[in-house]
Amino acid sequence: MNTSSFKVLLYLIFTLAVSFRIVLAAVNKGYANDNHLKVSTLILETGKIPEPQDCWECNQQKLYHFTVAKLWTFLQLNTDKERFLLAQLINAIAGIFTIVICWLFIKKQPFRESAKLLCFSLVALNPGLIAINAQASNDSFVILFGTIVIYSLYKLMNKPTIKSFLILLIFSILAGITKTNSLVLIVGVISVLVIKIISNGNYKFSLNKGYWGSLIIYLIATMLTVGYFGEYFSNYKKYGKPLVYTVPTGEMPHLYKKTSFFRPGVQSIIEGYFTFRIIDMIKHPIITNDKYSYPLHRTSVWSQLYGRANFIYFDDWPPGPWQCNDPKMMTIGRVALSLALIPFLFFLFGLIMDFRIWSALFFRRKIDFLRNSNEWIFHIFIVGYLIFIILFTAIGRDFSYMKMIYIFPGILAVLIPLLKGGEYVYKNILKNRILFLTFHVIIFVLLLSYLVPIINLITRLT
């Protein structure tokens, strides 16, 4: 690919990604997975932070809600329409910054331009990410902050500087007081710093020459600020636990025996975590919110994450225009779910390639890998978010816990395996011109099947 073609395609993808986020946020009219604006309204009306029992989403950390309430006051926005629009556009802007940071990271990697462009297009035009960037919820904030945290940690591992550390610390705190799933980021950063200190054997208390000082300051600062402003301390004092849920939780699932709870999600460990129901997803490309009538794939965690990421109508929620049974859209959804297997396999292949390195580390004790390469830090966050979603869905049991948006804050971590898988395919498989052209036609159709339903949704919303 020549330089001019690469730039044209890059600018086209970026323009489409920005346009869809802004337009969808502008026409959405307040539709969201949950009513987060109720929290902002209570802050505006009462002048204080609401208690967890005051509303459905009042158990959440409240940086986003507080920010929205203060901007409503500052801009003197009094109508629901104006308030919805501002709350959604803030998230669209957060989404735009997220994909910009993803590109800044991608372009630094030592892969061919075709693999970089493929990786960026799959992230920037991802339907699940575009959808949440257009809704008024705290997810876009924590996704942006998480992306900055992982990127700044990556830079810190390459060269310890006070600037990189302060960015890492500030955005870790902001993530921590935005949403609970950010705790995976904080634990991940601490784990990486500990591993780096041990592998390097460097215990200097310095922010420029080592990582020991960074670890101590990071631990103290995040523990105190996130604990206080994230309301973990106050929740523990008032309710005897740091986390308060409004959605019911049930007993842990059995290994084989199926048991249902609320609206069935994980019914057993085997069915919930050892299945991937791609055929059923293609047959039924949306889920239902019904307690008794639902497709088979609704009880498979990996199927739910995959479907929600690749088809904007898959969730069948929020109610209204976001729910669609148009046969044409369902057909396009089936195409998207089928073709998305290709980049998914790229990602898995990239992980397998890295697994060989980890095998060498554990079985041959090649500690130099930890000293000389920083790619391993992304695996810490991939594993962290996998553990999080497994525990979260096992405790929740309701299918609504199976959301891709909960692990999107770690999106930067998946880019290296995806790039490695794409690089391998370009280098070893797409040598034939016919294969090369066929592959790019398939990717074009996949991206088209991502965007056409979004265009349809924008039309329905207007």
Image: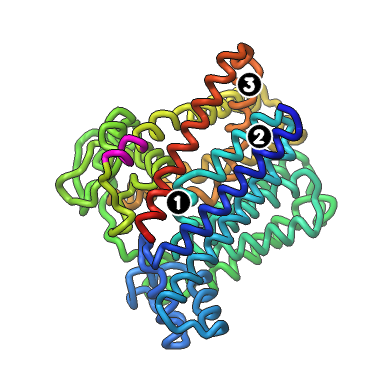
**Residue drawn at x 49%, y 51% as measured from the top left:** 130
Rendered location of residue 362, percent (x, y): 61, 27
**Disc 2 residue type?**
Lys
| Label disc, if present, on residue 405 of the rendered structure | 1
Rendered location of residue 438, percent (x, y): 53, 19
Residue where numbered disc 3 is placed: 426
Label 1 element class: helix
Tell me the quadrant of the picture where the N terminus can be found.
top right
Left or right of 452 in this view: 325: left
**Disc 3 residue type?**
Tyr
424 or 130, nearer to the observer = 130
Rendered location of residue 241, percent (x, y): 40, 67
341 or 263, nearer to the observer = 341
Q: Determine the CA span between mark 2 and mark 1.
A: 23 Å
**Residue drawn at x 52%, y 25% as measured from the top left:** 441
Using the rendered image of the protein, determine whether residue 281 is visible from the camera's viewpoint.
yes
Q: Is residue 265 magenta?
A: no
Label 3 element class: helix
Q: Which residues are magenta?
A: 327-332
Residue 322, quarter of picture? bottom left
362 or 81, nearer to the observer = 81
Residue 201, quarter of picture? top right
Left or right of 149 in this view: 251: left
**Disc 1 residue type?**
Ile
217 or 325, nearer to the observer = 325
The disc, 1 or 3, on the residue closer to the chain's N-terminal end is 1
The disc, 2 or 1, on the residue closer to the chain's N-terminal end is 2
- Is residue 44 placed above or below 130 in the rendered structure? below
**Residue drawn at x 68%, y 61% as measured from the top left:** 169
| Label disc, if present, on residue 307 of the rendered structure | none
Left or right of 410 in this view: 327: left
Label 2 element class: helix
